[in-house]
Amino acid sequence: MSPQATTSIRQRVWALIEPVCRHAGYDLVDVRFTLEQDGWILRVFIDVLPEDEMSASESAAAELNAVDPDSELAGERGAADLVDLNDCERMSRELSAVLDVEDPITQAYSLEVSSPGIDRPLVTPDHFRRFAGAEIKATLERGVATASGSERKNFRGMLEGIEGAGAATLVLLTVDGQLFRLPIDDLDVARIIPDWDAVMRGERGQIRSPDAPPSSSGKPSGKPSVASPKKAPAKSPSSSGKRPKPAPGSKSPRN
């Protein structure tokens, strides 16, 4: 399958499932459709939708999804603003049902729903607007011209926000005191570089305070006690009566 075909599938799936995620109180972070050793995998990454971006119905759905702090499940959850395995399993069931009905992918594949992790990707203009102030690294497909006349594709710096709209949206990134304007349509991948000191204090560590030093390439020395580490992806259960129900935690082949 050509890169153009997988991009088309990604766009169709995104348009189909984003309203479902938002209605349930989750932010659709990314969708990836890749061919691996076991076959085609559709990976869906979700995060908690910020309260100030929720409609009344989305806020109500988020409250229904919340775990009672006095319940037995409370000890299995991480921080209240982080997606955990229970969230992934819930959305795996909902998205599986929608995908079975709409059938946007013709070949067999497996669905995986996962937390994006602390170093979450940034994809949409809303993502870059929301995480202004975060340190990120970004890679462009074609690159942008520099003062020396060469093209630069790899960047690491402070996210300032965005300007423009639609296909003309530019991501504003300060690198070593220089402001770059990166075309959002040219972005191959952009990820947050976590502030591990903040993570060790039980915070998300995704937006840095002005006086925070730049992050090193890895975690701080020693084994950090992260408040809510990235969970293993929840595999999608089969919703078709013609297919045997997989054992818990197994992958669900889809036709």
Image (spheres, rainbow, N blue to C red):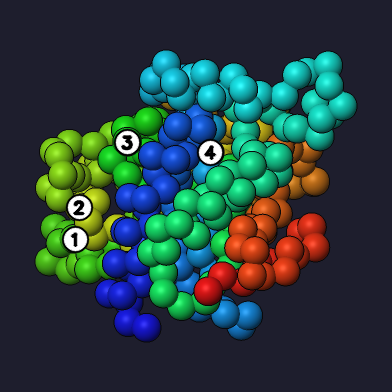
Would you say the residues marked 1 and 2 are in contact, meaning their CB atoms lie under 8 Å apart? yes
- Using the image, determine if residue 136 lies above or below residue 250: above
Disc 1 secondary structure class: strand
Residue at (52, 44) in percent of width and height: 46
Q: Quick one: label 2 or label 3, which is nearer the N terminus?
A: 3
Q: Is residue 223 left or right of residue 198?
A: right
To which residue does mark 1 refer?
Answer: 144
**Residue type of the residue flagged with mark 2:** Pro
- Which residue is most to the front? 241
Q: Quick one: label 3 or label 1, which is nearer the N terminus?
A: 3
Q: Which mark is residue 247?
A: none
Q: Quick one: label 4 or label 1, which is nearer the N terminus?
A: 4
- Using the image, determine if residue 3 lies above or below residue 128: below
Residue at (80, 63) in percent of width and height: 247
To which residue does mark 4 refer?
Answer: 47
Q: Which mark is residue 126?
A: 3
To which residue does mark 2 refer?
Answer: 183
Split into 4 quadrants, where in the image is the N terminus? bottom left
- Using the image, determine if residue 144 lies above or below residue 255: above
